[in-house]
């Protein structure tokens, strides 16, 4: 399975979005509280809104992916939502780090997390399809890669921020989203792993 190009690229792309999501899971409350100086209560509320936005994005992304796939076929239909979702996430994060008004930052970051959440369904279905009769194993490989990317975010973010600032550190996550989106040009959901 590790020789399957599509599974490998899906895993790396999922690691990129894992990095993006975990950055916000672990550091959004700190960012709102310490960097934007909103206070603990408001920061907790804002961080919760980001997570809820991602949950809404998951539902909408799955629905949209099914519709696009039905209209345009498996390859384009599967790739469309993750590619667009990851590019849009990066753009919305950029808008958020360029904005100084906390409510606007919340809006942009929420939209970014919603767009990132929209990618989840197509990612998972693709990983399982690529495994064929061993869909569980391919999903495990894929999820391990995603969590590896996510594992880096809590460590890299404060380190990178120390030297380049928090806006740059959050922008780095947007860059990873763009790189992950680009990998979908080489992912073919029909490229099943050999038995």
Image (cartoon, helix red, strand yellow):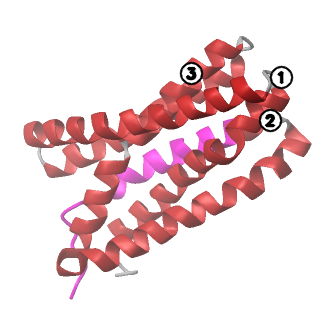
Count the marks: how many?
3
Callout 1 crowding tier (Cα within 10 Å): few <14, some 14–19, many ≥20: few
Distance of label 2 from label 3 (alpha carbons): 16 Å
x and y, in percent, of residue 173 in the image: 63, 43
Which residue range is magenta in the image? 171-195
Task: Name the spot of residue 27 as percent of width and height, x first.
Answer: 71, 42
Identify the image quadrant of residue 81. top left
Q: Earlier in the sequence, mark 2 or mark 1?
A: 1
Q: Outermost residue toward the right?
A: 163
Disc with the residue nearer the chain's start (1 vs 3): 1
Q: Tell me if residue 29 can be seen.
A: yes
The disc placed on residue 37 is 1
SS for callout 2: helix
Q: Residue at x 24, y 81 (%)?
A: 134
- Residues at circles 2 and 1 in contact by the CB criterion of under 8 Å: no
Q: How far is mark 2 from mark 1, CA to CA?
A: 13 Å
Residue of label 2 = 166
Q: Main secondary structure of the magenta part?
A: helix
Residue closer to the observer: 4 or 52:
52
Foreground of the two, 168 or 76:
168
Q: Can see residue 87?
A: no
Circle 3: element type = helix
Look at the picture and state if 147 lies above or below 83.
below
Judged from the image, the secondary structure of the residue bearing numbered disc 1 is: loop
Q: Is residue 85 above or below residue 109?
A: below
Read off the residue under disc 3: 108
Q: Is residue 149 above or below residue 135?
A: above
For the point 29% across and 50% down, the residue is 122
Q: Quadrant of residue 142?
A: bottom left
């Amino acid at each position: 399975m590790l020789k399957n190009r599509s599974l490998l690229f899906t895993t790396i792309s999922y690691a990129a979005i894992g990095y993006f999501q975990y950055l916000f899971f672990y550091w959004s409350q700190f960012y709102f509280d310490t960097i934007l100086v909103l206070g603990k209560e408001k920061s907790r509320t804002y961080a919760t809104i980001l997570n809820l936005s991602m949950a809404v994005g998951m539902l909408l992304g799955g629905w949209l992916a099914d519709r696009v796939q039905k209209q345009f076929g498996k390859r384009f239909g599967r790739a469309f939502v993750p590619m667009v979702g990851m590019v849009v996430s990066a753009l919305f994060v950029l808008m958020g780090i360029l904005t100084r008004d906390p409510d606007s930052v919340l809006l942009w970051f929420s939209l970014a997390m919603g767009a990132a959440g929209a990618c989840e369904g197509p990612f998972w279905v693709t990983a399982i399809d690529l495994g064929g009769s061993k869909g569980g194993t391919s999903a495990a490989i894929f999820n391990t890669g995603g969590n590896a990317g996510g594992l880096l975010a809590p460590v890299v973010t404060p380190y990178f921020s120390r030297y380049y600032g928090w806006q740059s550190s959050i922008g780095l996550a947007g860059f990873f989203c763009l790189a992950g989106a680009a990998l979908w040009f080489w992912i073919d959901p029909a490229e099943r792993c050999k038995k």
